[in-house]
Image (cartoon, helix red, strand yellow):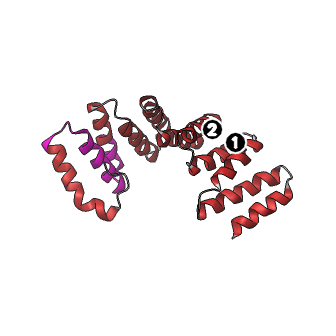
Amino acid sequence: EIYTLSLHDALPISASFKAAVDIDPNYVHAHANLATVLHLQGDLDGAKKHHQESIRIDPGFADGWMNLGNVLKALGQVEAAIQSYTTATTLRPDYAMAHYNLGVAHMSSGNHAAAIESYREATRHNSEFYNAYYNMGLSLQAVGQLEGAIKALRKATAKEGGFALSAYNNLGTVLDQLARLPEAIQAYKTALK
């Protein structure tokens, strides 16, 4: 399965996936991989078609449901994406990435309470899922649960690099909201490093 394919690598092999689908129209992973390549190439309708075909062939294919959700979200079909991610998490309850993507979809639709629950599930199944902690912190902040936001954002700061700097910046904002100025200043200073 190809999920971290670069556009440069995808172009020459898309013909191979098309050929595999032509040879065996019921080959689930050929449809899924072709859909991934099409998504990478910007052909969202083609990607949607092949992800839908992969889950028609195997309705229990959780990866297909999650990746269909990614395409639907990219197409602006957030409610359909939420349904697709929900199916993926139902089929595979420990699927941290599907829980995370479900949280992102809920967050983008303004349903922070549902997003928080999805991010909690993601981190329950992957305790080092720093993006989920970060987004959970943002959603907790949005609903006024500032102490929870601080805890989540502190966990997000454990990831190295530029991501941690964003987490420190948002942590500083939440601490500032609580008038915990010395801690806020320290978080902001760390973000500026």
In this image, 182 relative to 155: left or right? right
Q: Quadrant of residue 60?
A: top left
Relative image position of residue 168 (x, y in whole percent): 70, 59
Q: Local crowd at mark 1 within 10 Å, few (<14), some, or many (≥20)? A: many
Q: Could you tell me if the residues under marks 1 and 2 are in contact, i.e. CB atoms within 8 Å?
A: yes
**Secondary structure beneath disc 1?**
helix
Q: Residue tagged by mark 2?
A: 116
Residue 125 in the image: above or below residue 11: above
Question: For the residue marked with disc 2, what is the amino acid?
Answer: Ile
Q: Nearer the viewer, residue 176 or 158?
A: 158
Label 2: element kind: helix
- Give x and y (percent) for residue 80: 45, 35
**According to the image, label 1 marks what residue?**
140
Rendered location of residue 191, percent (x, y) = 70, 65
Q: Residue at x 39, y 43 (%)?
A: 67
Mark 1: which amino acid? Answer: Leu
What span is in magenta? 23-49
Q: Which mark is residue 3?
A: none
- 79 left or right of 157? left
The residue depicted at 19 percent of the width and 55 percent of the height is: 15
Total numbered labels: 2
Quadrant of the frame with the C terminus: bottom right
The answer to which of 191 and 109 lies nearer the viewer is 191
For marks 1 and 2 on the same chain, the one whose residue lies earlier in the sequence = 2
Residue closest to the eye, 64 or 95:
95
